[in-house]
Structures are given as structure tokens and as C-alpha cells.
Amino acid sequence: MAHEAMFNGWLMGIRTVFTDHSLFGFADASAILTNTLVLQYSLANVDRVICVSYTSKENTVLRGKLDPRKVFTIPNAIETRLFYPDPEQFYGNPTTIIFLGRLVYRKGADLLCAIIPKVCARHPKVRFIVGGDGPKRLELEEMREKYHLHSRVTLLGTLPHNMVREVLVQGQVCVLFLMKLL
């Protein structure tokens, strides 16, 4: 729908801006087609593009074959004061590591799956809370089963936005992987 709107805007002489949230994949045939055909075609006539990170900007410029001067970065904003850890859960409890995000390669789900057993083996009082869903969820479930980590790894699945804060304040560490792919 956004691509159709950009095309119609161009036909009608209306200036258009596309915001890229970096949701396109890289690893399969449909992603390659999206990147090479749809993105290049759709972005050919936009006036400006906004990306949510500098890496996203680099990728969008390459994938869309765009003039970098037409692409701007406006990072996602967050009010950090709302996410301070809960002191009652912070002290005297096992160290809790939180991961919230799509369970896909680009968000580091493979790395998460690899490090959890190692961290748990070295640190018996560490636990993990994982919120999110995606194609890598099955691998996380299998890892939890293989290493008998049911009591230390909680898989919450998809979280409604109003629950994100409640999960984040339970942890002392929040893990965020940034996979740079060009």
C-alpha cells in the first residue's frame, strides 16, 4: 500500500517521503526480489527517505540505488526514565537478562541461542527472559529443552506494547544485537 501511495504521489506531482524501518530481510529469494525490484522501483521517484539507523541508511542507499543526499537518519526515540529497573527485583534476585525483539537472524536470535547455554553453564544464578516471536523461536525452544533450562529461560512470545515496560524492568541486563549486513 505504501509503495502504491508513493507511485500515485509521483504521478500526481506530490512530493513523497518514505520511512524505512529496516523490516526487509536479506537471506531468502523473496527478500532479494523485494530489495532489488520492489525497493528500487518504489524509491526511484521519492523526494526523500528516512531511515531509523545509520546502518539502515547504508543498506537502503545500496539496495535502492539512491543518492545518499536524499536519505536521512532519524533514530527511534524512547523515554528512558520509564524503563528504570525495579529496585525490588534488581537486588537480591538472580541476575536477569532480557531480550525483546523479533526472533530472526537480523536481530541476533542465532547469537542468543548460542550464548544462553554458555552463560547459564558459567553463571548458575543467571536467568533469561525472551520476549518476541519469529522463525528462530523453535531453535530457542529446542536449546532450552536440550540443556534443561526451563527454569532459567522464559519464552514469553509476542508481547503487547503495554507489557514491554513490565518485562524490561525485571532485568539487570538488556541484550540487543545489531547485525550489520550489507
Image: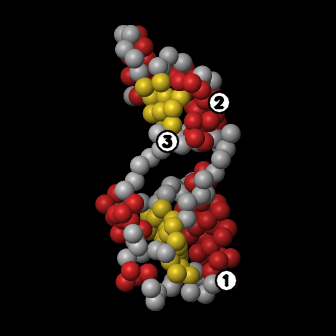
Badge 2: residue crowd in 10 Å (few <14, some 14–19, many ≥20): some
The image shows residue 132, relative to residue 34, as above or below, that is below
**Rendered residue at 37%/83% (across/down):** 88
**Amino acid type of disc 3?**
Val
Rounded to the nearest angstrom, the CA distance separating label 2 from label 1 is 42 Å
> Of label 2 and label 3, which has the lower sequence position?
3
Q: Nearer the viewer, residue 144 or 48?
A: 48
For residue 57, side relative to residue 170 (left or right)? right
The numbered disc on residue 56 is none
For residue 38, side relative to residue 6 (left or right)? right
Does residue 21 appear anywhere in the picture? no
Q: How many marks?
A: 3
Rounded to the nearest angstrom, the CA distance separating label 1 from label 3 is 36 Å
Pinpoint residue 91: horizontal percent, then vertical percent: 44, 85
| Residue positioned most to the bottom | 92
Q: Nearer the viewer, mark 2 or mark 3?
A: 3
Does residue 104 appear anywhere in the picture? yes
Q: Nearer the viewer, residue 170 or 158?
A: 170
Pinpoint residue 116: horizontal percent, then vertical percent: 62, 73
**Rendered residue at 48%/33% (across/down):** 50
For residue 71, side relative to residue 85 (left or right)? right
The image shows residue 84, relative to residue 95, as above or below, that is above
Q: Which residue is mark 2?
A: 62
Element under label 1? helix
Q: Nearer the viewer, mark 1 or mark 3?
A: 3
**Amino acid type of disc 2?**
Leu
Q: Which residue is mark 3?
A: 52
Q: Which residue is mark 1?
A: 121
Q: Quadrant of the N terminus?
A: top left
**Rendered residue at 53%/29% (across/down):** 71
